[in-house]
Image: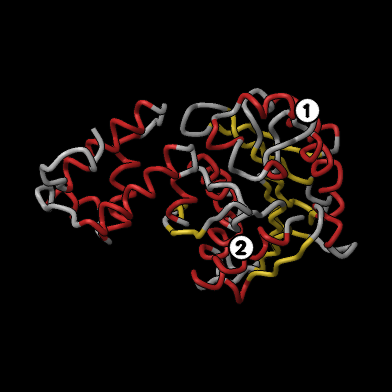
Amino acid sequence: MSPSETSDPWTVSRMIAWAADDFRSKGSDSPRLDAELLLGRILDKDRVALIMEAGRPLNDDELRAFKQLVVRRRRGEPIAYILGQREFYGHVFRVDKNVLVPRPDTEILVGLALKETQKNDQFGLALDLCTGSGCVAVSFALERPNWRVTATDLSAGALGVARANAERLGASWSLNFREGSLFECIAPGTKFDVIVSNPPYIPSGEIAELKADIKDFEPRIALDGGPKGFDLVDVIIQQAPNFLAPGGLLALEIGAGQAPHTASLMRAQGFVDTASHADYGHIERVVTGRIAERDA
């Protein structure tokens, strides 16, 4: 039964239950959360307030606005795009169709970069390739305020989102955004203490098998890693030694099953101390390696 098919009052709790049932039937992994987030946006309430006001009836304007958001979610549009934001590493990032929705597992990339740079946390140079929404670069910059961070992306639209996030979150003064593919917009001879990247790594043939909210809405340029998923990963590993200072760290997010190839190529390019790091689902998600220190 839809909200237009009954004279009984549509309270907060009833609307959430109705929308959650609808989303569940469409295959949502988090139907109730989806419903609560969307209704919270309409009513300008957080989830706790929705519980406290469970018996509050919605007026016609609120019902109409909520149904419009339900239709968008029913079609598979990601909640983050509908809301225009997603929380990442303790900060709220603005997102739209120009960028991937930040994933919790990508927080592993930020955490490792911070952990591996603790010894020189007072100053350093960092580079984030394929920055997208800027979630990695901005999160790192906020934790390392004395560092200078450069972030690149091929997409002008993505860089616009990243710049806006940096400005809103107070990190723009230490961040430099550049448009271009990987290292092509970095001056030769520039040496970074850490290079991080969450590049496209999904094999082209697997894009069609992804969930609808990913394949139909998120930018393919940020997903498609070529026939085997390694097109950009391989280039980053091959070129990174030219842009890393002695002892510098390379940290790459990769797909499930891609860690062995990634670590092997790193070692072939002279990286030492290579290691794979699991995400929250126990999948090897990030591979790290260092450029050897020069002999004293």
Mark 1 closeness class: few <14, some 14–19, many ≥20 residues within 10 Å: few
Q: Which residue is mark 2?
A: 162
Identify residue for label 1.
264
Comparing 276 with 56, the one in front is 56
The residue depicted at 72 percent of the width and 61 percent of the height is: 156
**Type of residue at label 1?**
Ser
For this view, does 267 lie left or right of residue 250?
Answer: right
Earlier in the chain: of badge 2 and badge 1, it is 2
Picture quadrant of residue 192:
bottom right
Q: For label 2, count other residues whose C-alpha is less than 10 Å away and answer few (under 14), some (14-19) or many (20+).
A: many
Q: Nearer the viewer, mark 2 or mark 1?
A: 2
Residue 13: x and y in percent read 16, 43
Indicate left or right for 121 with 196 as reference.
left
Residue 240: give x, y in percent of width and height: 81, 48
Which residue is found at the position 54% from the left and 65% from the top?
A: 165
- CA gap between label 2 and label 1 equals 32 Å
Q: Give the camera-side residue of 85 and 181.
A: 85
Tell me the tag on residue 187. none
Give whichever of 158, 55 is nearer the camera. 55
Note whether 184 is above or below 146 in the view shown: above
Colour scheme used in the picture? secondary structure
Residue found 70% across the figure and 64% down from its top: 150
In contact (CB < 8 Å): disc 2 and disc 1: no
Position of residue 179 measured from the top left corner of the image (x, y, whole percent): 77, 62
Q: In what quadrant of the picture does the C terminus appear?
A: bottom right
Count of numbered circles in the view: 2
Quadrant position of residue 262: top right
- Residue 121 on image: x %, y %: 58, 63
Query: Is residue 8 placed above or below 183 in the rendered structure?
Result: above
